[in-house]
Image (cartoon, grey):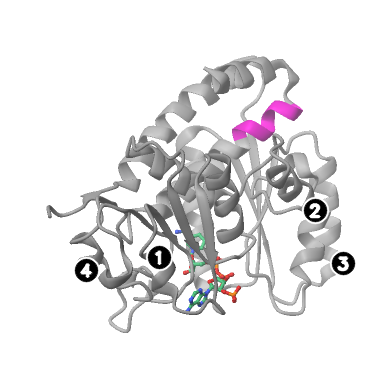
Amino acid sequence: MALAQLIDGRLIAARLRKELSEKVEKIKKRGRAPSLAVILAGEDPSSMIYVRNKEKYSKEVGIEASLYRLPVQTGERALLDLIGELNESPDVDGILVQLPLPPHINAQKIIEKIDPRKDVDGLTPWNQGCLMGRREGMVPCTPLGCMELIKSTGVSLEGKTAVVVGRSLLVGSPMAQLLLKENCTVIQAHSKTKDLFSYTRQADILVVAAGRPGLVSGEGVKEGAIVIDVGINRREDGHLCGDVVFEEALQKAAFITPVPGGVGPMTIAMLLRNTVKASAFFLPQSSDLIKLEEES
Ligand code: NDP
């Protein structure tokens, strides 16, 4: 069988950012640019890189990004107060709290404080409920990006078997919901799943989001599958790798995402899209523009 076709997340994300920048340009003409507040507490090196990229790409598409950098010892109260202020601010459309937070802060409490309309990460219980209940809301960026990558293959999803490895609220669980919405038959695996490959081998669409390097080898991949590798792991030699053994899966899948250059760039593109979407709530003069264009 021929090697799988690569799904180029960088290319697709660049295309999406270009579309977004055109939309942002029109929104700006009607008032102000959509705006995103990013909160970073502490100095986690990976978080600092992610936040830098979020700022960089916001700027590229014309979104106004403000970074709130807080020292690691910041207390929960101070963080809740900051979110309260940002919720009230007419100049802020989206709020993102970079996770993980320092261990003395209850992340769930912080997230629940975000106004669901400004919750561009889609993590508040309100937005989780919207996804469950098939209502319009903010969907977490990574699964939204994965869905775009899956759809880019042009393969019809209805009736296909989809296996999601992972059940986090950030990735695995919303991913499973999105695939269900596309009428896939969905199996969700996690760390207590027995004989993982007996499920993954059934997958026409396999999304792996476990954070375990090399968890899924070629043996666990069905011939002709679409494989989306969400995992980002740093190998001992410093290079990044996913949760799938890429070289082996390449021999069996029809489509596969690389790591890096697959899901990562899409996560940021979806954050920007969610910010533009959130701005429809707060820039009423632009809401018709945003809605009309999303429907077309
Ligand atoms: P979590 O640690 O929150 O969740 C991991 C999930 O994988 C859990 O549900 C866990 O099961 C499951 N799991 C762990 N080990 C196994 C195993 N051996 N077999 C089957 N399932 C297993 O991670 P996230 O969901 O936040 O992220 C997952 C990965 O995706 C990480 O590598 C992360 O870095 C990456 N990531 C990448 C992004 C991107 O933009 N590319 C964005 C976000 C995350 P259980 O629930 O039983 O513990």
Q: Which residue is mark 2?
A: 83
In primary-sequence order, the first of circles 2 and 3 is 3
Residue occupying the point 55% across, 72% down: 190
Q: x%, y% of residue 40?
A: 64, 62
Q: Is residue 207 above or below residue 275?
A: below
- Calculate the distance from the C-alpha at mark 1 to the C-alpha at mark 3: 44 Å
Q: Which residue is mark 1?
A: 200
- The three-letter amino acid code for the residue at tag 1 is Thr
Q: Which residue is mark 3?
A: 77
Query: Are there few (<14), some (14-19), or many (20+) residues within 10 Å of tag 2?
Result: many
- Calculate the distance from the C-alpha at mark 2 to the C-alpha at mark 3: 10 Å
**Where does the magenta region start and end?**
276-282
Labels 1 & 4 near each other (Cβ < 8 A): no
- Calculate the distance from the C-alpha at mark 1 to the C-alpha at mark 4: 14 Å
In depth, the one of 234 and 244 nearer the eye is 244
**Element under label 2?**
helix
Residue occupying the point 15% across, 54% down: 3
Residue 56 visible in image:
no
Magenta run includes residue 39: no
In primary-sequence order, the first of circles 3 and 4 is 3
Q: Give the side of residue 86 with respect to residue 138, left or right.
A: right
Which mark is on residue 248?
4
- The three-letter amino acid code for the residue at tag 2 is Ile
Residue 133 visible in image:
yes
In primary-sequence order, the first of circles 1 and 2 is 2
